[in-house]
Amino acid sequence: MKFIPSLLAAIAYLALMPSASAATIGGTYYAPQYDYSEFFAATDRRNFQVILAGDPLPGVDPNAVARDLLPVMQAAKPRPALTFTYDAPAERPRPYYRLVLVFNAADSLNSSAVCNGETRVQPGQPGVFNLYAVYCRNDQVMSETTAWTPASGSTDPRFGQLFRELFQVVFSDSPALKPNLGGGPDRP
């Protein structure tokens, strides 16, 4: 029974250590037509628009946050050689792929509304970076998730970890998400 005090000490030490993950990723949804290979083909060596809505960090200039987030997102980008941009294309492409980040989204907001250009926000909590990420193709939802992390300012290093984790979820390359994986009219 000598190991019990050592075990309790180890558990207490682990409980006091900072978490390896600075971000919390919420529930996810993938549309049946979501296909990572389509995302890759559409974005590789191209600009990929990110649309921001809401107040990222209450009490901090939203323009400064947007400016500081773009290189963080670029450093955490998924595998395609894409370049994130806030600039809207001169002419709306068909299909129109984009990532919409809604900060402090209203509880009643859903991803279909987001892909149709609607955003509703609620007051944010100071010191908390809370976002709803929706990947859209035209007016269709391809994937969605939520993420949040404590944040001390627009250059908080926890943003890098949040976006690395977020992009792995929103742009998942899991074979289980391939359309018609389980067979169907196109598969034997």
Image: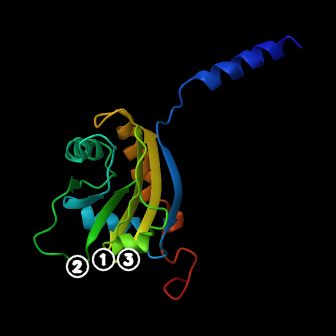
Image-based side of 6 in relation to 92, left or right: right
| Residue on which the image places disc 2 | 94
Q: Secondary structure at mark 1?
A: loop
Identified at 26% across, 59% down, the residue is: 50
Q: Are marks 1 and 2 in contact (CB under 8 Å)?
A: yes
Q: What residue is drawn where x is 70% and y is 23%?
A: 11
Q: In the image, what residue type sits under mark 2?
A: Arg
**Residue beneath disc 1:** 138
Q: Give yes or no for contact between labels 1 and 3 (Cβ–Cβ under 8 Å).
A: yes
SS class, disc 2:
loop
Mark closer to the observer (1, 2) = 1
Q: In this orientation, does residue 7 appear?
A: yes
- Residue 33: x and y in percent read 44, 76
Say which mark, if any, is on residue 87.
none
Q: Which callout, 3 or 2, points to the residue nearer the camera?
A: 3
Left or right: residue 98 versus residue 132 is left
Q: Quarter-wise, where is residue 68 in the image? A: top left
Name of the residue lying farthest toward the left: 90
- Which residue is more in the foreground, 161 or 56? 56
Q: Is residue 141 found left or right of 20 in the rendered image?
A: left
Point out the tag, 1 or 2, that comes first from the N-terminus: 2
User: Quarter holding the C terminus?
Assistant: bottom right
Residue 171 visible in rendering: no
Q: Amino acid at mark 3?
A: Gln
Tell me the SS state at disc 3. strand
Mark 2 or mark 3, which is nearer the start of the sequence? 2
